[in-house]
Image: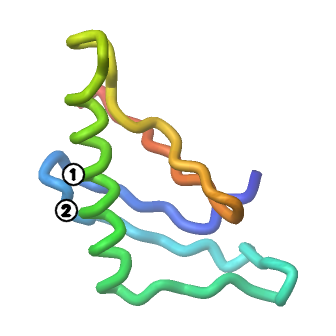
């Protein structure tokens, strides 16, 4: 599995850190890069989906929310820190 980008999002859904990895390349020779605004929108949207999924768990208090969002060409993982 290759990492294309790293995003760190705070508890409020704000983008704290973002880094693209230059070695990431697709069959066409590269991966389309997002603009700064698109990364902010992606971070806020992903945070919102994570919060909603943690609230709709059928078992109260068990779900930590969204862990993996998988599509045909990418996967987004959510890893929460204990602090």
Asked if residue 67 is positioned above or below residue 62 in the image, the reply reads below
- Which residue is drawn at the image coordinates 19% and 56% (left, top)? 13
Q: Position of residue 61 (x, y in %)?
A: 22, 13
Compare residues 40 and 17 and report the one nearer the observer: 40
> What residue occupies the far left of the structure in this picture?
12
Tell me the quadrant of the picture where the C terminus can be found: top left
Residue 14 disc label: 2
> What residue occupies the far right of the structure in this picture?
27
Q: Are marks 1 and 2 in contact (CB under 8 Å)?
A: yes
- Which residue is drawn at the image coordinates 47% and 84% (left, top)? 34
Q: Which residue does the numbered mark 1 point to in the structure image?
A: 10
- Which residue is drawn at the image coordinates 72% and 73% (left, top)? 24
**Colour scheme employed for the rendering of this structure:** rainbow
Q: Position of residue 43 (x, y in %)?
A: 31, 63
Q: CA distance from mark 1 to mark 2?
A: 5 Å
**In the picture, residue 36 is in which quadrant?**
bottom left
- Which residue is drawn at the image coordinates 19% and 62% (left, top)? 14
Q: Position of residue 17 (x, y in %)?
A: 34, 65
Q: Position of residue 57 (x, y in %)?
A: 30, 22
Q: Secondary structure at mark 2?
A: loop
Compare residues 77 and 63 and report the one nearer the observer: 63
**In the picture, residue 53 is in which quadrant?**
top left
User: Left or right: where does residue 62 sit relative to residue 75?
Assistant: left
Asked if residue 6 is positioned above or below residue 80 in the image, the reply reads below
Asked if residue 29 is positioned above or below residue 72 in the image, the reply reads below
Label 2 crowd bin: few (<14), some (14–19), many (20+), radius 10 Å = some
User: Left or right: where does residue 12 sit relative to residue 71?
Assistant: left
Asked if residue 20 is positioned above or below residue 68 in the image, the reply reads below
Q: Secondary structure at mark 1?
A: loop
User: Left or right: where does residue 16 sit relative to residue 21?
Assistant: left
**In the picture, residue 39 is in which quadrant?**
bottom left
């Amino acid at each position: 599995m290759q990492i294309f980008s790293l995003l760190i999002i705070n508890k409020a859904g704000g983008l704290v850190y973002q880094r693209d990895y230059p070695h990431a390349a697709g069959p066409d020779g590269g991966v389309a890069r997002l603009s700064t605004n698109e990364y902010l929108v992606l971070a806020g949207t992903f945070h919102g989906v994570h919060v909603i999924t943690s609230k709709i768990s059928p078992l109260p208090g068990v779900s930590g929310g969204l862990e993996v969002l998988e599509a045909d060409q990418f996967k987004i993982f959510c890893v929460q820190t204990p602090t």
